Image (tube, rainbow, N blue to C red):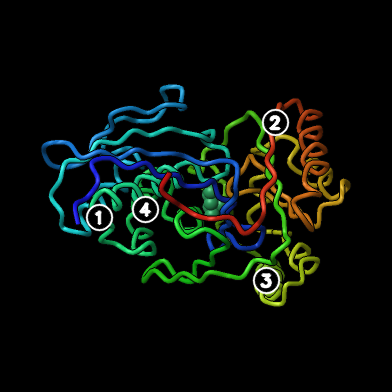
């Protein structure tokens, strides 16, 4: 079977952490993500042809660009010697807490693998994307894993890599609101506490365990009760003006629960059904407005697909 000359892939934005699941849980969402076109060219290795939608801010050098690193990892892991050129079309803001670098890496890995005739299975794309993420935003898999696999993913272990897809209650909806404001994941990781009080660790552990249990039982109210995080989110709240008020506004408008999306500044909320999302979204946008930040929002089903060809 001959391989295509050019392929186009999309990977979605992702909500990482889901409250107590710091670096452990991530959820794919609909309505935001990146598109990458991969093309066979003469020569060896990966190069970036163009990037759109980044305002000229992302590095074009192959060893510093998350998409190029992820594509190169596909070549390395398959042992294929080929020249690959990438067009990266950013469909989401950088530093938004929606896994922007992960979406670029996932779309690039997916496209490059398809360009080679798909020698790697979908799950086998994740390790290379983790390397790409590590180069720009720290070693964590809770954005790249759902960006590739879709749905809700639990990162059981990074080394060796072990991922579990968790069931997502069928009707559950998610709202994500993103202010026009940037928080770098690297800076947000530097804000993390060096020590965690034993009591906070125990309570966060209880919420994480309950959250996973609620996914299996389909108890959405219980699931949403578990989104509170008292270890990581408080340490980062100061980086995002108005974040506590935005979470309160979500609850006031009928959300089941709310928390920070990844390292922020986006805030997400869970709703019984996507149909209940717009009212929650609008209340959250208004709350960011009161903190002086313009914001936009999306409403998605919680069980959204991962990377795919377009
Ligand atoms: N788990 C990561 C963090 C996600 O919170 O730093 C970053 O999007």
Question: How many neighbours does mark 4 have within 10 angstroms: few (below 14), some (14-19), or many (20 or more)?
Answer: many
Q: CA separation, marks 4 and 2?
A: 29 Å
> Which quarter of the figure is the N terminus placed in?
bottom left
- In what element is the residue under mark 1? loop
Question: Could you give the CA–CA distance between mark 4 and mark 1, rounded to whole angstroms?
Answer: 19 Å
Residue at position x 81%, y 46% from top?
Answer: 250
For marks 2 and 1, give the one nearer the viewer.
1
Q: CA distance from mark 3 to mark 1?
A: 35 Å
Q: Is residue 204 in view?
A: yes
Mark 1 sits on what residue?
117
Could you tell me if residue 198 is visible in this image? no
Q: Percent x, y for residue 160?
A: 36, 71
Q: Give how far across and how far down residue 285 sits, in percent.
A: 76, 34
* Residue 153 vertical placement versus 64 (above, below): below
Q: Quadrant of residue 16?
A: bottom right
Q: Earlier in the sequence, mark 4 or mark 3?
A: 4
User: For mark 3, what is the residue?
Assistant: 215
Q: Is mark 1 within 8 Å of ligand 1?
A: no
In the image, is residue 280 above or below residue 290?
A: below
First in residue order: circle 4 vs circle 1: 1
Residue 175 image point, x, y percent: 71, 47
Which residue is drawn at the image coordinates 64% and 38% (left, top)?
239
Q: Which residue occupies the extreme front position in the image?
A: 1
Q: Which residue carries the number 4 mark?
A: 129
Q: Which residue is mark 2?
A: 295
Of circles 2 and 3, which is in front?
3
How far from the left and from the top, in percent, is residue 248? Answer: 83, 46
Marks 2 & 1, CB-CB < 8 Å contact: no
């Amino acid at each position: 079977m001959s391989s295509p000359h050019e392929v186009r892939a999309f990977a979605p934005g992702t909500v990482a952490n889901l409250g107590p699941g710091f670096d452990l849980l991530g959820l794919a969402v609909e309505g935001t993500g990146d598109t990458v076109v991969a093309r066979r060219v003469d020569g060896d290795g990966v190069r970036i042809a163009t990037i759109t939608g980044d305002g000229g801010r992302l590095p074009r050098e192959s060893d510093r660009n998350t998409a190029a690193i992820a594509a190169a990892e596909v070549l390395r892991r398959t042992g294929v010697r080929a020249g690959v050129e990438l067009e990266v079309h950013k469909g989401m803001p950088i530093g938004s807490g929606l896994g922007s670098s992960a979406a670029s890496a996932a779309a690039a890995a997916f496209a490059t693998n398809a360009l080679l005739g798909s020698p790697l299975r979908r799950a086998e794309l994740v390790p290379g994307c983790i390397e790409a993420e590590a180069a720009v935003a720290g070693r964590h898999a809770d954005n790249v894993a759902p960006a590739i696999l879709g749905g809700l993913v639990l990162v059981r272990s990074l080394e060796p890599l072990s991922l579990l897809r968790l069931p997502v209650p069928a009707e559950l909806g998610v709202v994500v609101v993103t202010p026009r404001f940037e928080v770098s994941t690297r800076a947000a990781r530097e804000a993390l506490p060096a020590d965690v009080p034993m009591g906070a660790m125990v309570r966060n552990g209880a919420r994480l365990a309950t959250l996973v249990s609620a996914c299996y039982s389909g108890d959405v109210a219980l699931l949403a009760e578990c989104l509170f995080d008292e270890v990581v989110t408080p340490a980062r709240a100061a980086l995002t003006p108005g974040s506590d008020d935005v979470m309160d506004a979500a609850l006031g408008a009928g959300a089941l629960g709310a928390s920070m999306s990844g390292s922020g500044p986006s805030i997400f909320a869970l709703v019984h059904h996507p149909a209940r999302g717009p009212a929650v979204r609008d209340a959250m946008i208004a709350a960011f407005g009161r903190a002086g930040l313009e914001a936009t929002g999306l409403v998605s089903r919680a069980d959204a697909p991962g990377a795919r060809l377009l």
